[in-house]
Image (spheres, rainbow, N blue to C red):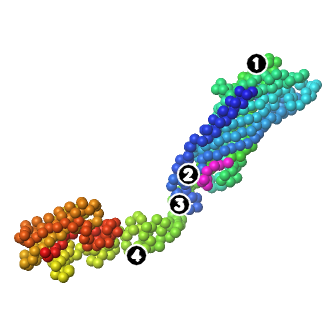
Amino acid sequence: MKKKFSIAALSFVSMLGFAQVDYSAKAVTSYSATENTTTSNTKFNSWGISAGAGVPLVQAADLTSIKNGNGKNLLGYSAYFSIDKAITHAFGLKLQYDRGETRQGDFDTRDKHPGGGNYIVGARTQYDALSLLGDVNFSSLLRRVDNKSPYRWALHGYAGIGTLAYRAYQKDMTSQRLMTEIKPFSLHSLFGQAGAGLKYKVSNSLDLEARLMYVMTGDDEFDGGGRQYSAINSREDQISDNMFNAQLGMTFKLGPNETHLMWHDPMQEIYYNLNVLENKTTDVEVCSKGDLDNDGVCDDWDRELNTPAGARVDGAGVALDADLDGVIDLYDKCVTVQGPVENQGCPNTDTAPTQVVGGTTRNLEGIEFDFDSDRILSSNTPILNNAVNYIKSSSDSYNVFGSTDAKGSDSYNQNLSQRRADNVKKYLISNGVESNRLNSIGLGESKLRYPECQPAENCPEWKNRANRRVYFEVK
């Protein structure tokens, strides 16, 4: 007895360990039957636990529970507990533990022998079983696409195998015999069971179920009779004692989501989508929270809720700025060329040096450079040619200052600004300015035209570009 119970306990612990393995429901897409919305990567609940009780009736055996020789049915009891996992909306697995007692023969062994009549022998069997069952949801498989009824009833089919342990007792007309058979859990004590259950969905968390299972023990001694009892064995030729098990139970669905995977109805998705395609006049609500700036992008994901009327926007509702100069295309007079806001997005057109401070600083607007480059742009050539004529007409000597924006390290920017100043100096010399009148000096990022652009991320691109410049100062 101790051996039997220790094996049963070990099997039950193994069942609980199996339940801890995390097979989470696959991500699926859910569709509302009343709204035109789609929620991606929604997970349905897929785990549950079930429990119930019932009445087992030995049917095909030497000693039976149904319509025995005295016309009386002998009722036993059974209980089950299972851990359930839904794989899809139509198929799942159950790891189930069953325990019960059957009563069979000519009389109930719990009662005193009635005496008289055709009473020969009575028996009872106490059993434990552990099995793995497949669960097929026929209601999901057979549901029509145009079925619009509430999905609250479901027909399930079950089948599986497991291992069976039992203790069979027998009583004859005079006294209780010794137990006829003791069989512990083992790989050789396999049994099978199959049946059907009708489920009713009480709520998102609870189902009720009535099921009828047919159990095939694969054992001729399960009923308390068998080959070693020739008088009893003569009643039946087959070697498997089988029984019906009628049960009522409930299922608790586990998980944080509203719907369980086994109650998900994909046919309603198809029906709804077909309905929308066929009914062209159906009003579809696109933006649940509206579109405040009427740019065609719903406020739910609009990153710029105050886009000016008439401005083109990207998918996030942000007004387009093709040249990235900080002036949106709606107001940019030079959409493909960068320029400051004060010049409506166009480059400055000053062609001659202008005096800025006290006659000592000369600022040549427009001598700007691409990011991380010291190459003189073709757009700078007219400005530099005017600078050549201006310097040659004067008697002053000049410092040629190079500058960078605030991106990059100080040492790198210092070197880059020096190269920019040197290249402008070389250009002026190659066009007739005496070399002894020019001195090139790199300032790095120490004297920005727009000091607020440090760090550079604080400013739009056109301001950072204006900081990448060369200007002149009288020595």
**Which badge, 1 or 3, comes first in the chain's sequence?**
3
Q: Where does label 2 land, which residue?
A: 43
In primary-sequence order, the first of circles 4 and 3 is 3
Residue 461's disc number: none
Q: Characterize the magenta stretch by its predominant secondary structure.
A: loop
| Circle nearer the N terminus (4, 2) | 2
Residue 311: quarter of image: bottom left
The answer to whether residue 146 is seen in the rendering is: no
Tag 2's secondary structure? loop
Q: Which residues are magenta?
A: 252-259
Q: Mark 2 and 3 residues: CB-CB less than 8 Å, in contact?
A: no
Residue 407 rendering spot, x and y as whole percentages? 29, 63
The residue at the far right in this view is 116
Residue 23 lies left or right of residue 207; in this view the side is left
Spatial CA distance of label 2 from label 3 is 16 Å
Pick whichever, 371 or 186, lies toward us: 371
Residue drawn 55% across and 56% down? Answer: 31
The numbered mark at residue 37 is 3
User: What residue would you read off at disc 4?
Assistant: 309
**Could you tell me which residue is drawn at 22 percent across and 75 percent down?**
348
Q: CA distance from mark 1 to mark 4?
A: 94 Å
Looking at the rendered image, the disc whose residue lies closer to the viewer, 4 or 2, is 2
Q: Nearer the viewer, residue 435 or 54?
A: 435
What's the residue type where badge 4 is placed?
Ala
How far apart are the alpha carbons under marks 4 and 3?
Answer: 28 Å
Q: Which-is-in-front pick, marks 2 and 3?
A: 2
